[in-house]
Image (cartoon, rainbow, N blue to C red):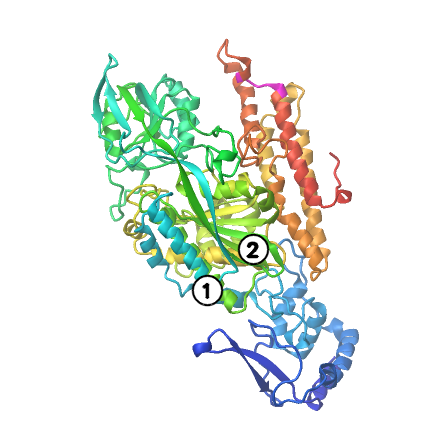
Amino acid sequence: MERLWGLLQRAQQLSPRSSQTVYQRVEGPQKGRLEEEEEDREEGAETLAHFCPMELKGPESLGSRPGQPNLIPWAAAGRRAAPYLLLTALLIFTGGKSLPLPQSEGPGLGEISGVQRWAQRESPSCHPPAFLLGYVAFRGSCQTCGDSVLVVSEDVNYETGLDSHGGTLYWNDLQAMFLRFLGEGRLEDTIRQTSLRERVAGSAGMAALTQDIRVAFSRQKLDHVWTDTHYVGLQFPDLAHPNTLHWVDEAGKVGEQLPLEDPDVYCPYSAIGNVTGELVYAHYGRPEDLQELRARGVDPAGLLLLVRVGVISFAQKVTNAQDFGARGVLIYPEPADFSQDPHKPSLSSQQAVYGHVHLGTGDPYTPGFPSFNQTQFPPVASSGLPSIPAQPISADIASRLLRKLKGPMAPQEWQGLLLGSPYHLGPGPGMRLEVNNHRTSTPINNIFGCIEGRSEPDHYVVIGAQRDAWGPGAAKSAVGTAILLELVRTFASMVNNGFRPRRSLLFISWDGGDFGSVGSTEWLEGYLSVLHLKAVVYVSLDNAVLGDDKFHAKTSPLLTSLIESVLKQVDSPNHSGQTLYEQVVFTNPIWDAEVIRPLPMDSSAYSFTAFAGVPAVEFSFMEEDQAYPFLHTKEDTYEKLHKVLQGRLPAVVQAVAQLAGQLLIRLSHDRLLPLDFGRYGDVVLRHIGNLNEFSGELKARGLTLQWVYSARGDYIRAAEKLRQEIYSSEERDERLTRMYNVRIMRVEFYFLSQYVSPADSPFRHIFLGRGDHTLGALLDHLRLLRSNSSRTPGAPSSSGFQESRFRRQLALLTWTLQGAANALSGDVWNIDNNF
């Protein structure tokens, strides 16, 4: 081997001096253009530290240059390369075994092989044997070899891909480029300015902001910018006939009116009319809270409920109250649920909290259909609209009501801070609630900007933020809008400097978000047949900064591994010297138990996954065990948000922007989509553990869950088989890469039940959706096996466990899971199951 190395050095001395093309950034008025210069390497000069520097534009095609003879490229290259070719062959065939490569256990999803990793470390330094062997072993190529160069990652979790000009963009360089351009923005100023603008959906202020954001998108010279208009039914308060609340005496006579401090605060989509009943206190209005009331001798049926803000959405509180027979709901903010830190601002006791009560998303008057033109559809209403009225009230009004309540004392965990004495459950005095909201057909506008991908332009990585707000909405939508605009500017700058993503980036500013993600859901309904084939992932920027103590990600299981990888790349905004991942594992070594949450219905990302079958994520920085008190109030101002974060708002917003941006780079630029399709096997296993609790009762009835076990096994085998196919495939085969990506990106869609109608059950996802087809509904039904013995005598049999219903639920769940396994297997001749 030493003799061969000596021969190679001698050949290098005898060969003509090499010439290397280097691309350098030009400063000054032509900043952003790359200048080419010839650098003649003197004999014996030190080799450049990076043989393949980050190249934002590919090398020129070979040919004549000013001041140089017009040589035939292959002839000129051949004369220089002849000694190398001979010695390369000798090195490979006689000495290759003397340079052992690091061994790898084999890459899983989102990893690269040991050979590729070795090539990454060695090829930049250009030591001849390492470079030559690396070139042979690695499937990519080097820029001086005249071929396209793969984007080689220095992070083992990063996939490779070609850039638009055939040059090299290392992951570290791409990351540095993103952070450099992101740092030039003015996020804090945009948050402040946006929060000062009126932007209720349908208002004149919103129309002006819509135009400004469209201009901002157009100014960045994106490939496409456009607006989508929907005509939706929104509910607003009737200022001529405001909502009211009165005392009612024992004789049923309406008495004194309780002043509702702000007539603008209301619950969109509340039932209209007036109701009268005695008042009871029902904690958060969860099903378990209402069951606890019954257990303590207070039946909610026929009464008005007083419930606290938080834990579950307004819509869930009202739906639960309706299911238990209540006549109406009053919702108030309990001071005990918010921070008691005297150094942080607190919500005024005169402030009520706004919130819609439609148990669903989108326009509730065109469920399942897009509201491009309402006259196309017959008059119909969503099943999620409540049939009882609801109204927000302030803490001051709530304290007056609580003082009047008698009856049993509330449980200790139900107590609050409004009274100097314990809370009681009631029933209390009679109340009369009147709600006079009115429905209005309102145009809303979503704004779109697109950077087209180079290899898979028909696959979209989507990122969006709500634009509208009831009140200042600093945390609710100004933060998300500011980050969205900054990411648009940053990625446009990267494109101007040579970056081009593999897949298209779609930036969207949504309207109608405060009414239940109306803008985003209507867009999904309008283009559902296209989006489930083209949308890869949705990243939501809503509610991104509600504190700075904890980080949560509400997400599909497919994105968990990618989130873990990116958290290791982003610095913590309030723990110097730590990444976000290190901050999380310091608290809880099981990082995903600390961070990952399922998508709730009130998340703007929920419809993407539960309705359209697109994996989605919404992440938030939050306060430690306390809710942000000003959300959905007129006190959600820039100044209050800044005080809650005690001056750390710029750092936290910057961290969110970095996290979102690096997610976008990975999702849009990786050759193989970094979605962990095997994770759903673990999800199913976890749920099977819950189902197994009832195996004894089912066996006694001659029933079994074996179908679910078999379908889960088939899914695990299909996922592992796909992993093996990807691992053993030719990485540079674009046809295979695209085929694998299509199978990976549709995994979420496979979990939408194909056996129920989207019009009747829009949320068809078997894990996240609503309806009898879901795993949650099956579990609720199985719980009736244990409550049958305690069922009230004379109650209808439909209120207990029904074998026929169980069999249907089991079939719906099992065949959806089996269909996901079959689809993941690929072609029908590759399906291998024993079902």
Closer to us: 805 or 604:
604
Q: Crowdedness of circle 1 by 10 Å Cα count: few (<14), some, many (20+)?
A: some
Q: Which residue lies at the image location 24% right of the left edge and 37% below the top edge? A: 349
Question: Residue 813 in the image: x percent, y percent?
Answer: 62, 32
Tell me where residue 201 appears, x and y as whole percent. Answer: 38, 43
Location of residue 578 (image quadrant): bottom left
Residue 741 in percent (x, y) is at 65, 52
Q: What secondary structure is found at the residue carrying circle 2?
A: helix
Label 2 environment density (alpha carbons within 10 Å; few <14, some 14–19, many ≥20): many
Q: How many marks?
A: 2
Question: In the displayed structure, would residue 581 be above or below residue 497?
Answer: above
The residue located at (68%, 76%) in the rendering is 145
Which residue, given by chain and number where applicable, does mark 2 sit on? 667
In the picture, which quadrant includes the C terminus? top right
Magenta stretch in the rendered image: 799-804
Give the residue type at disc 1.
Leu
Q: Quadrant of residue 727?
A: bottom right
Instruction: Mark yes or no: residue 831 visible.
Output: yes
- Is residue 560 visible from the viewing direction of this image? no
Q: Which residue is mark 1?
A: 179
Q: How far separated are the C-alphas under marks 2 and 1?
A: 17 Å
Looking at this view, is 166 or 99 the one in front?
166
Q: Residue furthest top?
A: 794
- Quadrant of the frame with the N terminus: bottom right
Q: Is residue 220 above or below residue 720?
A: below
Q: Which mark is residue 590?
A: none
